[in-house]
Image (cartoon, helix red, strand yellow):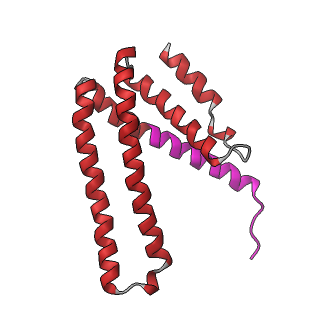
Amino acid sequence: MNKVLLIILLATLNLNAFSQQYTKQEKIERLKAQKVAFITDKLNLTTEEAQNFWPLYNEFFKQKEKISSDKKQITIDLRQNWDRYSKKEKTELADKLILFRVKEANLEQEYHEKFKTVLDIDKVIKLYNAETQFKNYLLKQIRSQSSINEIDRPAKRK
């Protein structure tokens, strides 16, 4: 049943359907739905496990997105204002970037412990593998879409 659900969901949410007709928010929501279906299938969650796991995972992911967003802002600011910053300011910003990595690691450690309270260790490990597999799946889709776009795009003139 889960595999059928996954196949149907992935077919309907194919990245090719992410053309110009969808807003950025709609695309994000569709990707999140794909991820939920993918992880649910890979972990083979029971109804009870899913009810306990998904709120916890969503909480984790929301915090992870916040850290990534804050890190991205500093990275963009640093890149755009590189020449304006003194060495001291650059050092402070670089230190902040490292602190974001520490925050991410601490967050992952915290939620690893929480995940173990709602899933057995085999499924926790499968979760980490499923996240990696999903990222690889998305990268493959993006590369595939990029190569299709390259074919459709006229050659640049020199």
The answer to whether 24 is drawn above or below residue 1 in the figure is below
Name the spot of residue 56 as percent of width and height, x first.
34, 32
Give the residue at x 45% y 81%: 82
Give the residue at x 38% y 19%: 45
The answer to whether 97 is drawn above or below residue 111 in the figure is below
The answer to whether 89 is drawn above or below residue 139 in the figure is below
Horizontally, is 49 left or right of 158 in the view?
left
Give the residue at x 37% y 24%: 43
Name the spot of residue 156 as percent of width and height, x first.
74, 69
Magenta segment includes 98: no
Name the spot of residue 113 as percent of width and height, x first.
21, 35
- Residues in magenta? 134-158
The answer to whether 79 is drawn above or below residue 132 in the figure is below
Q: Which sits in the foreground, 31 or 125?
A: 31
Quarter holding residue 97? bottom left
Give the residue at x 43% y 68%: 75
Magenta segment includes 137: yes
Q: Which sits in the foreground, 54 or 20?
A: 54
Spot the residue most to the top: 1
Horizontally, is 94 left or right of 158 in the view?
left
Horizontally, is 151 left or right of 15 in the view?
right
Prevailing SS of the magenta stretch = helix
Name the spot of residue 57 as percent of width and height, x first.
37, 34
